[in-house]
Image: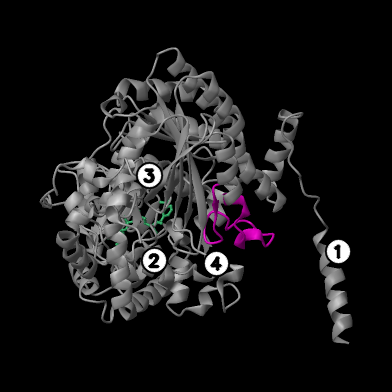
Amino acid sequence: MQTNARISKAMTIKLEDLFDDLPKTPPFADGIRRAPARQFALGPKDTQLALKNALRYIPPKWHKKLAPEFLEELLTRGRVYGYRFRPKGRIHGRPMDDYQGACIEGRAFQVMIDNNLDFDVALYPYELVTYGETGQVCQNWMQYHLIKKYLETLSREQTLVMESGHPLGLFASSPEAPRVIITNGLMVGCFDDPQNWNRAAAIGVSNYGQMTAGGWMYIGPQGIVHGTYSTILNAGRDKLGIPADQDLAGRLFVTSGLGGMSGAQGKAIEIANGIGIIAEVDYSRIKTRLDQGWVSQVTEEPAEAFTVAAQHQQQKKSIAIAFYGNVVDLLEYSVNHNINIDLLSDQTSCHAVYEGGYCPQGISFEERTELLRSGHAGFKEMVDATLRRHYELIKALADRGTYFFDYGNSFLKAVFDAGVNEICKNGKDPIDGFVFQSYVEDIMGPILFDYGYGPFRWVCLSGKDEDLTKTDKAAMECIDPERRFQDRDNYVWIRDAAKNQLVVGTKARILYQDAMGRMNIALKFNGMVRKGQIGPVMLGRDHHDTGGTDSPFRETANIKDGSNITADMAIHCYSVNAARGMSLVALHNGGGVGIGNAINGGFGLVLDGSERVDGVIRRAIPWDVMGGVARRAWARNENSIDTSIQYNQMRAGSDHITIPYIADDKMIAKLVSEAFEKVKK
Ligand SMILES: NC(=O)c1ccc[n+]([C@@H]2O[C@H](COP(=O)([O-])OP(=O)(O)OC[C@H]3O[C@@H](n4cnc5c(N)ncnc54)[C@H](O)[C@@H]3O)[C@@H](O)[C@H]2O)c1
């Protein structure tokens, strides 16, 4: 039988050493958004398990005091967060030199974690949720403190192993190995569903990392502005016939959500020079975007929203208008009043549709929160009815010429789950896709991911504006705007990035780039660090990228060789990045589309100016992107085949991609139909 005295003696990193005494619960400041109560469906046995699990972090002298407190959190919030251990005051990513650490990476990751929990950045900072309704940095505040301590201790000869928010420990490795290796929410196949995952999260053994929340690479809503800008701009070009050198002047985009990622929509539509109406049920989120200048006007009636939009359309003046209300009410009005909408989407959190991600029609946001708190009675039915109505309205608008696309939030899947089989191409299940396209399937996949263009990003760890200015300029010098229209868009993006005031939180930048673009920029930055022109830089990307994510509902929605339901690519991307010495590697279940619907991975690489890091950049960054392009090429995606052919020429002697021969469709169809006819006879 183990004794707690023996266990305590065996650890040098433990919670009790970080606090002189049991800390007092810091007050909850007004105006900080709180996560709704999470689904609590544990029976007495599992509740006991959850408490014992949470108390694993707590020294026995505090058990009696904290056990009832944790139980209360579990019963009222659905999770044990350990609120008492919340740091006092505001958390934010400070300059790297403000942090303790035995190696630069250990300090850099602390900047990233604190930025993910910054009150200006995080969706529900008290519940450690960065974005996407449920995307957490880790499960509870006890883990937060231990992770910080581990990062302070971490040396270049060690790797910190993170399992769903739990710091498993430090293990000996080498300077060439990752300093941190992270997984979040991974489940064994037959248990890989929301119900089993919810139980695992409630008993404290799993964390929903979304993509960059649990992977510590979130850079605020800017991270998604560039992708959103490219998506709506290219939707306009592809679906509305706007020429490649023009923008969305005079065109109306209607959508919903001004939350973590969805909040980027207002800014993106203005940068693309169009007119946007964004429905949002939570006024606090409208206010955040209004204060930031990412929406310009708030309306409370659909009529007012469409009138303001029409005035701006006539003048071809861009504007982002927030509509304070339910998106279904807004669409109801446009259908009834025959208002023309050019582009239509939705960015409610449908990946967590019954957990508060999607507000039913006919109730306010506050009423929805109360229903969630008081045990969900009738909530699911209300959500389902609203989703069905939402679908009917979209259909009516699409019949009149509106282009609707799913924004990677599992909206189409949620409508299917609400009982609408006709939303499936085959009329029965999603295996062949849906009748409406997702933005990756139609736009981002073929136009960006298939070439390798994806959401490359960096954070200037010095916290200095001047470093960001220098990196923007250096990145711009690496882009040839004449090569492709995508390069021209990216060039314009980075040229105007400072003017567009995109930074919230740390001094960060997003820039879509392809494999060689990313490598060249990274080498240039590392050289600048070496010469002392800038401080160290953290490089990374969203998992939502060419090669980082396997998800038939989103990133791999335009993979048509049947492999869209496999997850080999994301796992290879992650493991090979680890083998090639990225500073941090992360692999998650779920991401933007929910548990069981995606496997996604990402990386972080600290540029310290060394020759060693030059080597990592050369080996790892092209792989990180081209692994995805190669898989897309193998799925016969045209633009990926082109990119792979060029890559094989460019990297002859070092890299080599297997490229598919293309069979004749007609010959195959004839052969198969004859064979089946024979069988029938
Ligand atoms: N932007 C992207 O490129 C992108 C990429 C990946 C995933 N997503 C997905 O988009 C979704 C949104 O992400 P987020 O981080 O903004 O989440 P979020 O939860 O922070 O924001 C969603 C917002 O929708 C609002 N909302 C819910 N129901 C509504 C309704 N019926 N009418 C009007 N507003 C309503 C909520 O109040 C909330 O503010 C997620 O499912 C996410 O996974 C977006």
Residue type for callout 1 = Met
Q: CA distance from mark 2 to mark 4?
A: 14 Å
Please tell me whether residue 561 belongs to the stretch shown in magenta: yes
Residue 279 versus residue 359 in the image, above or below: above
Q: Does 616 sit left or right of 373 as displayed?
A: right
Q: Nearer the viewer, residue 363 or 38?
A: 38
Q: CA distance from mark 3 to mark 1?
A: 45 Å
Looking at this rendering, what residue extends furthest in the front direction?
Answer: 1
Q: Describe the element under mark 1 as helix, strand or loop.
A: helix
- Disc ID at residue 53: none
Looking at this rendering, what residue extends furthest in the bottom direction?
Answer: 681
- Disc ID at residue 667: 1
Of the two numbered discs 4 and 3 on the same chain, state the one appearing first in sequence.
4
Which range of residues does the magenta coloring cover? 548-570
Of the two numbered discs 2 and 3 on the same chain, state the one appearing first in sequence.
2
Indicate the quadrant containing the N terminus: top left, top right, bottom left or bottom right.
Answer: bottom left
Residue 406 versus residue 528 in the image, above or below: below
Q: Are marks 2 and 1 in contact (CB under 8 Å)?
A: no
Residue type for callout 2 = Ala
Residue 575 visible at all: yes
**Residue 125, x across and y down, in percent:** 24, 50
Q: Are marks 2 and 4 in contact (CB under 8 Å)?
A: no
Q: Describe the element under mark 2 as helix, strand or loop.
A: helix
Pointer 2: what residue?
Answer: 200
